[in-house]
Image (spheres, rainbow, N blue to C red):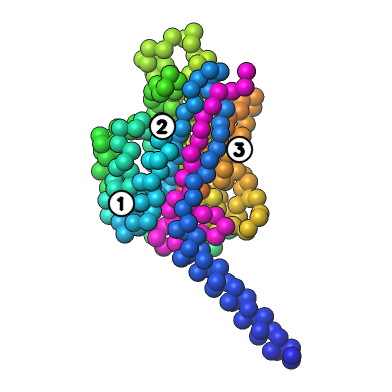
Amino acid sequence: MRPGRAVAATLTGVAAAGAAAFAWGALVERNRFTVRHEIVPVLEPGARPLTVLHLSDLHMAPWQTAKQEFVRSLIRYEPDLIVDTGDNLGHTDGLRGVEYALAPFAGIPGVFVHGSNDYHGPVFKNPFRYFVTLEDVRSSRRADLDTAGMESFFENQLGWLNLNNTARAIEIRGTRIELFGTNDAHRDWDRLDLLPGAIEEVRENVGWSASSRDDVLSIGVTHAPYRRILDDFVNQGAELVLAGHTHGGQVRIPGWPAALVTNCDIPADQAQGLSHWRSGQHDAYLNVSAGIGTSIYAPVRFACPPEAVVLTLVPRPE
C-alpha cells in the first residue's frame, strides 16, 4: 500500500472509532443507569444498619422518561434516608420530571442541597475548556428555573429537610443524626461562616444530652466537593460527607483510575466513589456520586455510566 493510502486508511479508522465511541456515549452509556453499592462503618456498635440513597445531578428534562423510571425504581431498596446533592433541574420544565421521578419517596426522611442548575438552566459551553481551566463561575444571569417550586415539592410533599448553609437533626431507627450542608460552592454560594452557629443551635435545641454526643452520627452534604468545604466539614465533626457535581469526569479512559476533569479542586482520583478525606487529625468517609444525568447540551458519557448510590451504614468494628 502506498504511504498516502496508508495514512488515509489510518485516519479513516481513527474517525470511525471516534464516531463509534461518540455514538456509544450519546446513545447507550448515558442511559445505562447503574446502582453502586457501598458499605460504610460509621454507626455505634449494636446499632441497626441504615440504608442511605444518594441521588445527585439529575439534570432533568421533561422528556427523559427512562431516567425518571430508573429513579422511581430505586424505591425497591427501601431507603431509610435520602440525600439529594443538587443539580436536579436541567430544563425550564424539568420540575415536572423531577416530581414524577421522586414521587415514590414521599414520607421517607430526606435532605437536600442545591447546585447551580437548581437556579439556572443549562447553556451551551465548549466542553474542551474543562481540560484547561475551571468553569468561569461569574454569572450575571437571572435565575430562570422554578427553584421555589422545587423546594416546596421537596419540603411540603416529600417531607425533606433543606440543608443549604444550615444544619438539622433527625433520628432514624434509633440512630441520632445531625446533618449540615452548604449551597453550591462552585458558585461561591456556600456560607461556611454560618455552619458553626447553625450546628450549635441544633445541638442546643434537639434535646439530646451532651453526655450522649458519642452516639450522634454527623453527616456533611454539599453539591460541589471543593477542598475548603470538605476540610471544614471534617473539622466540624462529619464522619460521612456526600457530594456530586463532578459527574465522575463524565468522559473517562477505560481502566484509568482517575477522572480526566473534575470541574473543582478535588483530587482527580476522588472525583467518584467512596474514599477517605483527611484534614489535620480528622478523617471522614467521602462519597462522590457520578450523578444520574448530564446537561442537555453535552449528552455523552464514556466509561462513566450514570449512577445512584446505595450506602449501607453499619456499626464500626468494636
The amino acid type of the residue labelled 1 equals Gly
Q: CA distance from mark 1 to mark 2?
A: 21 Å
The amino acid type of the residue labelled 2 equals Leu
Magenta segment includes 268: no
> Looking at the picture, how far across and down is residue 47, in whole percent?
50, 20
The residue pinned by badge 2 equals 81
The amino acid type of the residue labelled 3 equals Ser
> Looking at the picture, how far across and down is residue 231, in whole percent?
56, 32
Q: Which residues are magenta?
A: 292-318
Left or right side of 258 for 186: left
The residue pinned by badge 1 equals 97
Left or right side of 41 for 7: right
Assess disc 1: are there few (<14), some (14-19) or many (≥20) residues with their C-alpha within 10 Å of its C-alpha: many
Residue sitting at x 57%, y 27%: 41
Q: Is residue 9 above or below residue 241?
A: below
What SS does tag 2 mark? strand
Q: Which mark is residue 62?
A: none
Q: CA distance from mark 3 to mark 1?
A: 32 Å
Residue sitting at x 37%, y 33%: 110
Q: Is residue 243 above or below residue 175?
A: below
Circle nearer the viewer, 2 or 3: 2
> Looking at the picture, how far across and down is residue 147, in whole percent?
29, 44
Assess disc 2: are there few (<14), some (14-19) or many (≥20) residues with their C-alpha within 10 Å of its C-alpha: some
Q: Which mark is residue 275?
A: 3
